[in-house]
Image: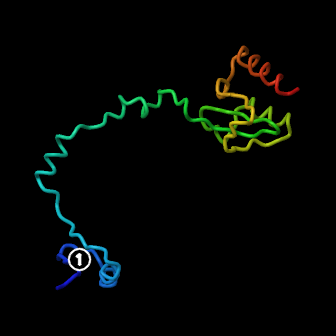
Amino acid sequence: MNDSPEKPATATSKWTRHQLESLQALGIPLYSFVQQSTTSQEFNDQAPRLNVESEPEFNDQAPRSNIEFHYRLGGWTLRTAERLPVELYPWLKDLSSHLQQQLTEIKADPQQPHLDVTPWCKTTLSPEEKRDLWNQLKLWLN
């Protein structure tokens, strides 16, 4: 009785002799590569398709409240809903300069108090947004 798996011509042409011997020594069965049958093709054509644009988890406009990014700046922990760009926002550059510290992405620590800066994560802030941001930051500066 031969315990080795059959080696169809279509399969062996895909493997070198050394690879075939290694597969056999490890007891890994050798499967042949075959064309997809018309029956399975018809089945795949009838299978429901995922409409990525209609699914909220794939939609770029959908809120991603479960994703957070945390950064250390001096003694502060900043939280954002999206990863900060490499070229930091002007206000964040100013804050980094004021604290004489560089921003570093960190692993979230639920025990560590943090400042959520998501509303201000944009290149240009209106005067009202700047005032709100600096009012929040003043609370943390003391």
| Outermost top residue | 128
Q: Is residue 134 left or right of residue 62?
A: right
The percent position of residue 28, horizontal first and vertical second, equals: 31, 74
Q: Residue at x 83, y 23 (%)?
A: 138
Location of residue 129 (image quadrant) = top right
Mark 1 highlights which residue? 13
In the rendered image of this protein, does residue 89 appear above or below residue 39?
above
The percent position of residue 89, horizontal first and vertical second, equals: 70, 32
The percent position of residue 97, horizontal first and vertical second, equals: 83, 36
What amino acid type is highlighted by mark number 1?
Ser
Q: Is residue 16 left or right of residue 56?
A: left
The percent position of residue 50, horizontal first and vertical second, equals: 30, 36
Q: Residue at x 67, y 40 (%)?
A: 108
Q: How is the image coloured?
A: rainbow
| Outermost left residue | 38
Q: Residue at x 23, y 77 (%)?
A: 12
Question: Badge 1 local density, few (<14 within 10 Å), some, or many (20+)?
Answer: few
Location of residue 13 (image quadrant) = bottom left
Q: Looking at the figure, which quarter contains the C terminus? A: top right
